[in-house]
C-alpha cells in the first residue's frame, strides 16, 4: 500500500515505503518494480524524488536496472552481501540466526577469556569499553565499531585463534548486525545505558576471572540484543 507524501523530504519517505514493501514481500525478489511514472502518480510527487529513492536502492544492491527493462528486486540476503540498507530489510530470521550464533560462540569465548586473560589483555578490554562509552555518551554515535573492538578484544583474550578467526572472517556481517542493532538505540538513552551497564558487568567478571559469571553476563547481554530486535520488529511502523 502506498501513502501520499507529507512535508518531510519526499525521497526519504518514498525510500522507507519501498523498503517496507520489499521487506513484507509486496515486491519480492525478481519482481519488476512499477515504473517511475506509476510510482510518481501513486506517491503524488514528481519523478525526481522517485529517482533519488530508487538510486539509493540501486547503490545498496537491493534493486538493479536495465536500460529499457525497468528495475527489479535482487537477492538481498545478508549472507550474499553486506550493506547497511540490506540489513534493514533482511529476513528477520536471518538476523536472529546470526545473533544466535554470536550468543553460542561468544559466551563461551568470554568465559575462557576470564580465565586466560593477561593484565595487558584486560587493559585492552577495558580500553575498548571506555571507547564505546565515549562514543555513545559523549559523541552521540551508535558506537558499532567500538562495540566490535570490545567483543574482539575479549575473543583475543581467550587465547584461541579460531574464535578470533571466525570473528574476522565474518567481520562485515558482525559490523552490519552491530550497526543495525545499535542504530535502534538512537534517542533511547535507557537502551544505551543498559548496553553500557551490561558491558561493565562483563568487564568486571573478566577482571575477577570468574568463568561462570562471565559466561552468564555475556549470554544475558546477547540474549537481550535478540529480544530487543524481536520486540522492535513487532512494533507498528
Image (cartoon, helix red, strand yellow):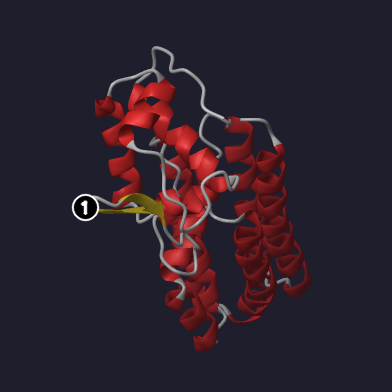
- Tell which of 105 and 25 is nearer to you: 25
Q: Is residue 130 visible?
A: no
Q: Secondary structure at mark 1?
A: loop
**Which part of the image, by quadrant, shows the N terminus?**
top right
Looking at the image, which residue is at 66% across and 42% down? 233
Looking at the image, which residue is at 78% across and 72% down? 212
- Tell which of 63 and 140 is nearer to you: 63
Outermost residue toward the top?
7
Residue 18: x and y in percent read 46, 38
Q: Quadrant of residue 38?
A: top left
Q: Is residue 23 visible?
A: yes
230 shown above or below 209:
above
59 shown above or below 206:
above
Lateral position of residue 9 relative to residue 93, left or right: left
**Which part of the image, by quadrant, shows the C terminus?**
top right
Lateral position of residue 171 relative to residue 53, left or right: right
Looking at the image, which residue is at 48% across and 73% down? 121
Looking at the image, which residue is at 67% across and 30% down? 236
Is disc 1 surrounded by few (<14), some (14 to 19) or many (20+) residues within 10 Å?
Answer: few
Residue 53: x and y in percent read 33, 36
Outermost residue toward the front?
68
**Where does label 1 land, which residue?**
67
Residue 108: x and y in percent read 69, 76
- Tell which of 90 and 65 is nearer to you: 65
Outermost residue toward the left?
67
Q: Quadrant of residue 190?
A: top right
Amino acid at each position: 500500500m502506498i501513502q501520499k507524501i507529507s512535508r518531510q523530504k519526499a525521497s526519504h519517505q518514498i525510500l522507507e515505503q519501498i523498503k517496507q514493501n520489499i521487506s513484507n514481500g509486496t515486491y519480492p525478489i525478481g519482481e519488476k518494480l512499477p515504473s517511475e511514472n506509476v510510482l510518481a502518480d501513486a506517491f503524488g510527487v514528481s519523478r525526481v524524488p522517485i529517482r533519488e529513492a530508487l538510486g539509493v536502492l540501486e547503490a545498496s544492491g537491493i534493486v538493479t536496472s536495465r536500460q529499457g527493462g525497468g528495475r527489479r528486486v535482487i537477492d538481498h540476503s545478508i549472507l550474499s552481501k553486506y550493506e547497511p540498507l540490506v540489513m534493514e530489510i533482511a529476513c528477520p530470521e536471518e538476523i536472529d540466526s546470526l545473533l544466535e550464533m554470536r550468543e553460542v560462540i561468544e559466551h563461551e569465548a568470554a568465559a575462557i577469556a576470564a580465565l586466560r586473560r593477561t593484565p595487558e589483555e584486560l587493559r585492552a578490554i577495558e580500553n575498548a569499553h571506555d571507547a564505546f562509552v565515549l562514543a555513545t555518551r559523549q559523541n552521540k554515535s551508535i558506537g558499532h565499531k567500538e562495540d566490535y573492538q570490545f567483543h574482539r578484544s575479549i575473543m583475543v583474550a581467550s587465547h584461541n585463534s579460531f574464535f578470533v578467526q571466525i570473528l574476522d572472517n565474518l567481520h562485515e556481517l558482525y559490523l552490519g548486525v552491530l550497526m543495525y542493532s545499535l542504530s535502534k538505540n538512537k534517542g533511547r538513552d535507557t537502551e544505551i545505558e543498559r548496553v553500557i551497564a551490561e558491558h561493565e558487568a562483563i568487564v568486571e567478571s573478566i577482571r575477577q576471572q570468574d568463568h561462570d559469571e562471565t559466561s552468564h553476563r555475556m549470554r544475558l547481554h546477547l540474549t537481550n540484543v535478540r529480544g530487543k530486535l524481536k520486540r522492535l520488529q513487532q512494533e507498528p511502523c
